[in-house]
Amino acid sequence: MSGPVHVPVALRWSDMDAYGHINNTDYLRLLEQARVEGLPLHRDPGVTGFLVVRNEIEYLRPLAYRSAPVTVTMWCTSVGGAGFDLGYSIATQGNDPDEAPQLPDQRQSADQQTVHAVAATTLVAYDFPTQRPRRLTADERAELDAIAGPAVSFRRRATTP
């Protein structure tokens, strides 16, 4: 495998909020679903796996409920001793027939992509029996290197006091 991973993720009717858009908290579920389906790392449930320690999301455009899946593109932005960072984009392709018609100047051709959000997640490799972080294996590092890409470019970076 080489380059970013593209994972189609179906939206659920229950993801929609009172405004007809996918609720901001459900974006985390979309990222999780993409990681479970598309991250090329071996997991041994109850023994080894990966824990999320940080998420950052920047919402770019509202995402209306649609029957067509969204595409979550995922890549590895950095690898450390026990942890790694993933970058994502959540996008739709063209206009979905289930969506309300857009104004003429907002229409897209069927091959045009709309990015609704970009995100970054930090994960740590974890040993569940000892309840401690563990070092990434050589195989895990190779798998992450195969999907390497640039850091997510957020429009505004948070500052810490």
Image (cartoon, rainbow, N blue to C red):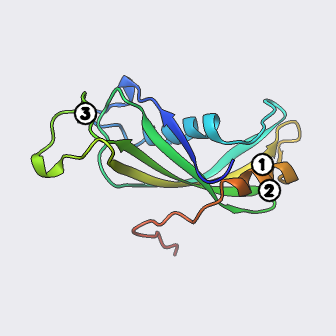
Q: Tags 1 and 2 in contact by the CB under 8 Å rule?
A: yes
In the rendered image, the vertical position of residue 90 relative to residue 85, given as above or below: above
The structure residue drawn at horizontal position 53% and vertical position 42%, both measured from the top left corner, is: 31
The structure residue drawn at horizontal position 66% and vertical position 52%, both measured from the top left corner, is: 2
Tell me the residue that label 1 is attached to. 125
Q: Secondary structure at mark 3?
A: loop
Q: How many marks?
A: 3
Q: Is residue 8 left or right of residue 127?
A: left
Q: Is residue 28 left or right of residue 23?
A: right
Snapshot quadrant of residue 32: top right
Tell me the residue that label 2 is attached to. 82
The structure residue drawn at horizontal position 32% and vertical position 48%, both measured from the top left corner, is: 112
Q: Position of residue 61 (x, y in %)?
A: 30, 51
Amino acid found under the numbered disc labelled 1: Ala
Q: Secondary structure at mark 1?
A: strand
Q: Secondary structure at mark 2?
A: loop
